Amino acid sequence: MTEHQRITPTTLPTLRSLSQAERREWIRQRYPDGPDFYWWLALNEDIGIEALKLLRRGESAREVFKFAVEFLELGRTMGLSALEEAYWLIRFTATAQDFRVPADELPSKLTPDEAARAALAAMPLDPERAATLDATYRREWEMGIERQPDAESEALADTFMLESTFEWIEEAVTDPEVKAQILRWRNNFT
């Protein structure tokens, strides 16, 4: 992270106190070229920590989860990828599930079904293509063939990263179609 994109202890409270339009302007003023991946990562980590602190004390994290979704929606308009958004939706959903947060206290995007739908839609590869590439790369690796990273290998890595998050929420998914799609992924990689 560049010095310019360093996050101060007041960044998150400041962003929480602003409207969505004001947040966008606040970010644009400080980062004319847009914040980098690590800025979004750090702030989402801070949001998750804030939610955990409240939940561990037995307090409601409704407002934190609402802000988390708004922040991700803003991020999507400012360079955060659908894959990155889906990862965080699942991560925040898993946190809520771990603490048995009632569904009526969560934004709809943080229900297991909706978070899983977002992840499924953001997958850069389909299960069959990912399995084929994985098998090819493993064979090449076993034969000592070195492969330089390329778009397909990066898509495969992103696919594996996102697919691995399903285990955090899959037991709570209730939509049969979403469950079937998750199972399709699991059958290709387990």
Image: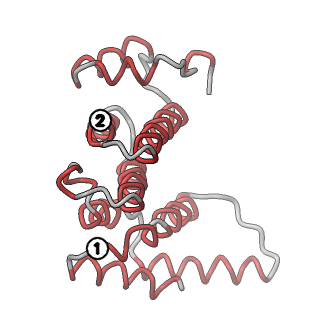
- The residue depicted at 43 percent of the width and 82 percent of the height is 128
Query: If you read the primary sequence from the N terminus, does the residue marked by circle 2 or circle 1 appear first?
Result: 2
Q: Quadrant of the N terminus?
A: top right
Q: Which is nearer the eye, 137 or 79? A: 79
Q: Give x and y (percent) for residue 135.
A: 60, 83
Disc 2, SS = helix
Q: Residue at x 53, y 35 (%)?
A: 42
Residue 185 is situated, as x and y percent measured from the top left of the image, at 41, 80
104 or 35, nearer to the observer: 104
Residue topped by disc 2: 67
Give the x, y percent position of residue 10: 47, 16
Mark pair 2, 1: CA separation: 23 Å
- Give the residue pinned by disc 1: 173
Q: Quadrant of residue 80?
A: top left
- Please say if 88 is above or below 47: below
Tell me the amino acid under the disc marked 1.
Val
Indicate the secondary structure of the residue bearing disc 1: loop
The residue carrying pointer 1 sits among few (fewer than 14), some (14 to 19) or many (20 or more) residues within 10 Å by Cα, namely some
- Residue at 45 percent across and 37 percent down: it is 50
101 on left or right of 83: left
Q: Is residue 41 above or below residue 3?
A: below
In the image, is residue 13 above or below residue 152? above
